[in-house]
Image (cartoon, helix red, strand yellow):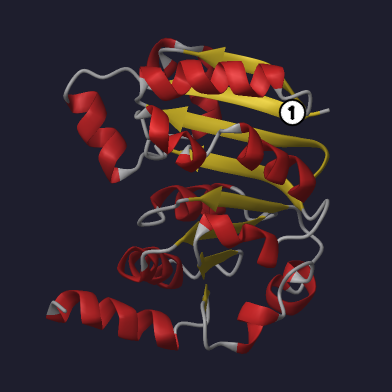
Amino acid sequence: MARKKLHHYEFSAKADNVIEAGKSLYTEVKGQWNKLYFNNENPIVVELACGKGEYTVGLGKVFPDKNFIGMDIKGDRIARGSFMATEQNLRNVAFLRAGIQYSNEFFDKDELSEIWLIHPDPQVRDRDENKRLTNPDFLNRYAHYLHKDGLFCLKTDSTFLYDYSLETISQSGRFQILEHTDDLYTSHLLDEHFGVKTHYESIFTAKGHTIKYIKAQLL
C-alpha cells in the first residue's frame, strides 16, 4: 500500500468524524445519528458515494443548521473529507466508511431529510444496471430513509445516467420530480449549489461537458 494512502487510513482510524468498522458507533448509529453523533435534532443530509467529500463539506459550511453525512467505501477519500471538515471546525459534518449496498445497516425509516448523489459512476453497461445508484431498488431504499417530503437530488455529467434517472424516478411511484435541467450552469437551479464543485466536476466542465441536475421529492 502506498505510504500516502496508508497515512489516510491511519488518519481516518483516529478521526472522531469518521464512522467505520471497528468503532463503536459503526454498529450503534442506525436511527440514532442525531442522538449519538450530532447531539442535536437538526435535519440530516446524506451524500452517497461522496468521494473526497467536497460537497459534504461545502454544504456543511453553508448550512450550519443541518447535519451532513458523506458515505463512501474508499477510506483514503473519506480521510480527505474528514481532514477538510476538521480544519474548518465543522461539527455538523461526519463521514461513514461503508458500501452503499449496506446502507440499511446505518439509516432508519424517516431518518433523513435529503439524499444527494454527486457524479456517481453511471454504470452504462446493461449488465451493470443493478449497480446504478438510481435504479428502482436503490430508489426504494432512499424512499424508506427519507421522511415525508424529503428530497432526492442527482448531479451528473452523464447524459445516459440523467435520462435513465428521469425515467426511473418518474416511474417509481415514490417520488415526484420537482425540477430538472440538462445544463445546470445556464439554469436558475445553479443557485441551489452555492458554488460548491467537486474535483471531477471542475474537470468535466473544463472539457466542455454540461452538468445535469434532478431534484425530486418523496411523495
Q: Nearer the viewer, residue 165 or 89?
A: 165
> Residue beneath label 1, please?
217
Quadrant the C terminus occupies: top right
- Residue sitting at 53 percent across and 47 percent down? 59
- Residue sitting at 70 percent across and 46 percent down? 141
Quarter-of-image position of residue 119? top left
Q: Residue furthest front?
A: 127
Q: Is residue 99 left or right of residue 12?
A: right
Dot 1: element: strand
Q: Vertically, is 61 above or below 174? A: below
Residue type (three-letter) at the residue carrying disc 1? Gln
Q: Is residue 176 left or right of residue 211?
A: right
Mark 1 residue crowding within 10 angstroms, few (<14) / some (14–19) / many (20+)? many
Quarter-of-image position of residue 176? top right
- Residue sitting at 35 percent across and 28 percent down? 124
- Residue sitting at 52 percent across and 50 percent down? 48
Q: Nearer the viewer, residue 60 or 7?
A: 7
Tell me if I can see residue 122 in this picture: no
Quadrant the N terminus occupies: bottom left
Q: Nearer the viewer, residue 169 or 82?
A: 169
Residue 71 rendering spot, x and y as whole percentages: 51, 59
Tell me if I can see residue 99 in this picture: yes
Quarter-of-image position of residue 200? top left
Q: Is residue 185 left or right of residue 41?
A: left
Residue 165 rendering spot, x and y as whole percentages: 54, 23
Residue 4 rendering spot, x and y as whole percentages: 17, 76
Q: Vertically, is 71 above or below 179? A: below
